[in-house]
Image (cartoon, rainbow, N blue to C red):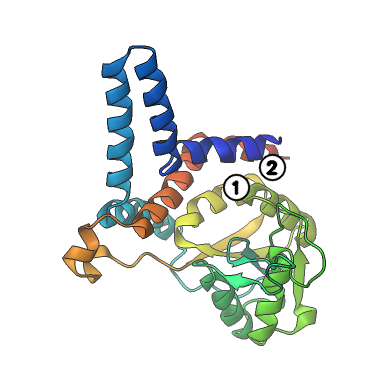
């Protein structure tokens, strides 16, 4: 098991709902050991974590905190022309998985591709680099890596096929930066990613020595835009966004693997 997969599993286990399952197992073990008070504390904390992270205002506050850092980097402003390439990072689309699915489908981050196509048509850069691989190798169908799936979608948005460069080996943001660096060889790039992802991407791109600017997409909609009862009731959607934001925060605070990008 690679260190990346190990860390990914570890982070998943400390976040709900996996953390709740871990807490239930710990509760059973502690009760069996006669530590009833400690078992109740462990289970209570896990339940509280799940409820709090399922609240809309909590997930929104976490995302907005990341997006404010992105705005300080200028990621909410139109990019100045011109760049050698526009880079679209993975996470925007789920690749095909034959024989179960022969076509890819979009995710919440698919705004990245739409925005990249708009920038290309506006003449910001002469080509688009799509970067993203697949944990499980698939055969028997098209678009079985994120890069190839994004390539097909960009072609459907009017980007000529010969203006798209596919990088289908990256499995995380660090590999995105490393592999894109080898493609552009010192060229200036505009990285398109989600607003909450901008701070980490910018830090890694800087460590990797890229000549870059970054622009954000799919910015968080303020929680007050919805009815109060929808905002304050715990929901699976809010829990999912809290997990996304917390992963970014943990990576920014503790992940030092990006140091390997330095030359």
Q: Quadrant of the C terminus?
A: top right
Q: Residue furthest top?
A: 34
Q: Residue at x 28, y 65 (%)?
A: 222
Q: Which residue is mark 1?
A: 204
Question: Do tag 2 and tag 1 residues touch (Cβ < 8 Å)?
Answer: yes
How many numbered tags mark residues here? 2
Q: Secondary structure at mark 2?
A: helix
**Residue 198 falls left or right of residue 24:** right
Residue 90 in the image: above or below residue 23:
below
> Which SS class for mark 1?
helix
Q: Is residue 247 left or right of residue 149?
A: left
Q: Quadrant of residue 133?
A: bottom right
Residue drawn at 42 percent across, 20 percent down: 29
Q: Nearer the viewer, residue 250 or 226?
A: 226
Q: Quadrant of the N terminus?
A: top right
User: Does residue 259 show up?
Assistant: no
**CA separation in Å, label 2 and label 1:** 8 Å
Q: Position of residue 150 (x, y in %)?
A: 67, 71
On residue 59, the disc is none
Q: Position of residue 42 (x, y in %)?
A: 33, 26
Q: Residue extending furthest left?
A: 228
Q: Is residue 220 left or right of residue 206?
A: left
The residue tagged 2 is 261
């Amino acid at each position: 098991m690679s260190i990346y997969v190990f860390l990914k599993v570890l982070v998943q286990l400390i976040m709900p709902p996996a953390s709740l399952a871990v807490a239930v197992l710990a509760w059973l073990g502690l009760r069996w050991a006669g530590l009833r008070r400690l078992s109740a504390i462990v289970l209570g904390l896990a339940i509280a974590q799940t409820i709090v992270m399922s609240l809309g205002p909590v997930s929104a506050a976490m995302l907005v905190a990341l997006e404010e850092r992105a705005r300080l980097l200028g990621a909410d402003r139109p990019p100045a022309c011109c760049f050698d390439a526009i880079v679209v990072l993975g996470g925007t689309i789920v690749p095909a998985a034959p024989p179960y699915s022969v076509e890819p489908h979009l995710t919440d981050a698919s705004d990245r591709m739409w925005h990249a196509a708009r920038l290309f048509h506006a003449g910001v850069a002469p080509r688009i680099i799509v970067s993203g691989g697949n944990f499980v190798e698939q055969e028997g169908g098209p678009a079985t890596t994120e890069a190839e799936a994004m390539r097909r979608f960009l072609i459907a948005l009017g980007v000529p096929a010969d203006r798209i460069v596919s990088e289908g080996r990256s499995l995380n943001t660090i590999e995105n930066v490393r592999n894109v660096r080898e493609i552009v060889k010192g060229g200036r790039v505009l990285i398109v990613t989600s607003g909450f992802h901008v701070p980490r991407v910018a830090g890694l791109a800087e460590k990797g020595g890229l000549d870059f600017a970054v622009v954000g997409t799919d910015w968080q909609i303020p929680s007050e835009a919805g009815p109060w009862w929808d905002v304050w009731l715990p929901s699976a959607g809010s829990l999912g966004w809290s997990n996304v934001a917390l992963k970014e925060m943990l990576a920014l605070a503790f992940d030092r693997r990006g140091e390997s990008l330095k030359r």
